[in-house]
Amino acid sequence: MKNTYRIYPYPMKITETDGFFCGTPYCDESDPSYDGIRDYFGAGDTAIKFSSSRPMPEEAYILTVSQDGISIEAGGFAGHFYGAMTLWQLKKQFGTHIPCLTVCDSPVVSHRGVQICYGQVNVEYRRDWIFRFIRQMAEIKINAVYLYLEWDFNYACLPHVNGSRFIGGAQAREITDYAKRYNIKIIPSVNLMGHSSGLLSLQKYHNLMEYDCATQTERTALTDALCPSNPRLKELIKLFVDELCECFDSDIIHVGGDEVALIGTCPECKKLFSEVGRMGIYLEYFIYINGLLKSHGRKMGVWGDQILIFQPGSKFWVDKEIETKFFEQNKKLFDHIRDNTIIYDWWYEGGSPESIAFLKENRLQFVSCSSTNGCYTAGITLSQQKSQRSLYKDALSSGAYGILTCDWMNYIGYHAELGGLNLASGALFSWSGTDRFDTDESFERFRRIYALYRYGTEAIVDYLHMTSDYNSELLALFPQKFRGNALRKSVFFSDNPLDIFMRFDVFFSDGKLAAYKRAIDKLEKLWDKASSETDDPWFYLQKMPLLVHQQIYRRYVAFDAFYREYDKSANMQFDDTAGFRRAIGRCKRILKAHRDNDYAEIIDYAEEICNKLGMDYASVLRLKKTRDNLNKLIRFLTRMTQSDRSLPYVGMLSSYLFTRIESPFWYPRSYEWAKEQPPFVSYEVDDRSLAMCYDFDYDKLNPLK
C-alpha cells in the first residue's frame, strides 16, 4: 500500500487507486435517522452519496473515495453509519486531501458490546460523559453498551431506595434515544439474585435475604443473596422487570445471576434443596424471570458461572453429592430457557474452550465476555489484550452470539476513561476477528494506530507500558502481587498518612527508592510528551497512574525523613529536653511541608473525576482526611513534649491514631454514608487482611496462543 491508514477496527479489504479527493464531505440526507452521521459531517462542500442498490448484510458497507466524490453503499442506515465512521477516521488522518480508495468491510459477529460499571459503589449519572462515551464506542463500531447497574437504578416502583443521583427511567430513555443516533443499543444489567446487598442492607427489604439458618438469624445476618422462595420477592421482581422493559427498549435485559454464595440455606429454601438441589432452585427462579421477560418480547441474559456448575470438573463444581443426585432432572430445565436466554461466558483470562464446549453441547446461546481488568490494576493492563484475543478466538470459532468487553470498576481512582485501549481491543476483535493478531508486533501496531486516532499521540502507549506492564522498570521494583491495584488502593483507599511508609518500607531498601525516583522521572517525561501532543480536553484523566506513583514516593520520602527525626527524639527524650524539643520541632516541620505541598493535585484529581465522571465521593474524603490526619499527628507530637510518657513505636501511631471501617473495595451502600451530614459522615478503608489486593497472580495473564 502507498499509505498507512489509521482505520480502526481494521477493514476487511482496502483497494487503493491514484489521486486524492480534495474537499470537505458532508451529509445532506433529510431522513432523521441519519442525524448521527450529520453530527460528524454537518457542513462541507461535497455531499456524501449514500446508496442501497443491492442486498448486503445489515452492517456491511463499501466506501469509495474518488477524485470526483465520496459514496457509501450499504443495505441501510447501519452500514451507511459504519462507512461514515471509517470516512471520519480518514478525514481525521488526511484532512481535506483523502487518498482515493475503496474499503469493503463487514463485522465478524453481529453483537459487539462493551460494559461500563454504574453499580456496587454507585457511579452518579453524568450526561456529558456518557454521551461522549457512546460516540467514542460508535466510532469504533460497537453496537451495544451495557450499563452494569446491580441495584443502583432509581426504580419508580421502589421509591426512596435510590436517589436522583442514580440513573432512573428518564435518564435511561435519554441515553437510549441518544444512542440510537449511532446504531447503539443500551442494555441494562441488573442482578436479581446475588450481588443484592444494595437492597438487602435496607431494613425494609432485609427479610428478602437468603441466609444460613444453621449459623445465622434473619434479624442480624447480612448477605448479598436474595431468597428465591420468598413470595414477596417474586412480586417485586415482576415490578422490576416491567419497569426495566418500559425504560429500556433493548431486545436483551441482563438479570445477573452470578456469584450467588447462598442458595437453599434459609428455612423455606432448605425444603426445596432436599427435593431439587441447588441448581433446581436456581433454574426454577430464573425460569420465572425468563417467562416475565418473554411476555415483553425480550431475551434474558444471565452470567454463566452458575450454569457451569453443571459442568463436572469445572472450578464452579460445588455440592457434588447432592447435585449429582439431581443432575439429569435439573439439566432438563434448560429446555425452559434455551430459546429465550443468552448465557454470558465471562472470564478474566482466556480462552475458555471447556465452557464453550459445554454451552454448545447443551444448545445454549452465549456471549463471550472478557474484562479490561481495571479492578485488578493500577491503571490499565495492556497484556490483558492477549487474554481477550485468546478468549474471543475460541468464541468466534464456536458460533458465539456476540462479544462483550466488561469494565467492572469505577472506584478508588479507576474509571472507564482509563480502560479505553482495552475496550478498543475488544471492539477490534469483535469487528475484525483475531486472525491478524498473532505476534507482539501486531498488538503494538494496533495500540499505536488507536492511540493516534483517539488521542493524537503515540506517547500514551509508552506511558501505559511503563505503568501497566508488570515487568516494566517501574513495576518490577515491587513484589509481583503488589504491582496491580495495591498501588492504587494505597493512595485512594486509606486515610492513614503513615500507611504507605508502613507498607512500602520493606520494598525501598537497597537502593530501590532511588531507582523508583528515576522511573517516576522517566514516567513524568512520557506524560509531558503525551499531554503536549493531544488536544483532547479529557486527556488529563489518564494521569491517575502517574499521580499514584508520585503520591507513594512523596509520602514515603516525607515519612522516611520524619522517622529519622522521630527516632532521634526518642533517644534524647529524657536526657536532653532541649534537643528533644528541637527534634520534635523538625518532625512537625517535615509533616507541615508534606501537608502543604504534596496533596493538592491528587485531591483536585479525585474531585475532578467525581464531578466529571460521577466517581465515588469517598475517595475525595479519604484523601482530604489523610491530609487532615497529619494535623492530628502534629498535635500528638506537641502533646508528647508535655508528657512523661515515652514516645511510642511509630507503628503504634499508625494503629492507634487512625482507624476506620475496613472493607475489601466496598461496603453495602457506603456511598450514602460518604454524603451524610456531619457528624455522621463515614467511609471504609482498605482491609489489610487482603494484603491490599485480591490474591491475583498477574503472571497468569495469557501469552499469545
Image: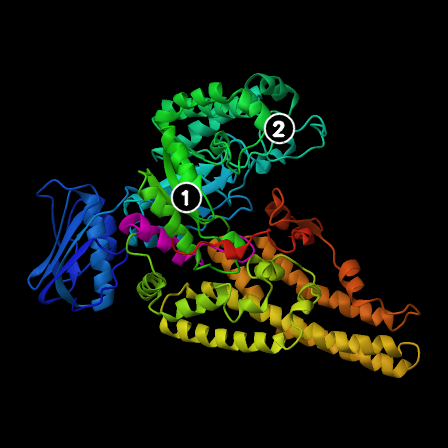
Q: Residue at x 79, y 75 (%)?
A: 566
Q: Earlier in the sequence, mark 1 or mark 2?
A: 2
- Three-letter amino acid code at disc 1? Cys
Nearest to the observer: residue 43 or residue 230: 230
- Which disc, if any, is residue 369? 1
In percent of width and height, residue 556 lies at 66, 71
Give the quarter of the figure containing the N terminus: bottom left
Q: Residue at x 39, y 37 (%)?
A: 356
In percent of width and height, residue 692 lies at 63, 56
Residue 485 in which image quadrant: bottom right
* Membership of 420 in magenta stretch: yes
Q: How many marks?
A: 2
Kindly report which numbered mark, 1 or 2, lies closer to the viewer in this rendering.
1
Residue 129, above or below 667: below
Nearest to the observer: residue 386 or residue 119: 386
Q: Which residues are magenta?
A: 410-434
**How many neighbours does mark 1 have within 10 angstroms: few (below 14), some (14-19), or many (20 or more)?**
many
Q: Residue at x 17, y 54 (%)?
A: 27
Q: Which residue is mark 2?
A: 210
Nearest to the observer: residue 151 or residue 17: 17
Residue 405, above or below 456: above
Circle 1 SS class? strand
- Which disc, if any, is residue 118? none
Q: Is residue 282 something that shows in the picture?
A: yes
Nearest to the observer: residue 608 or residue 334: 334
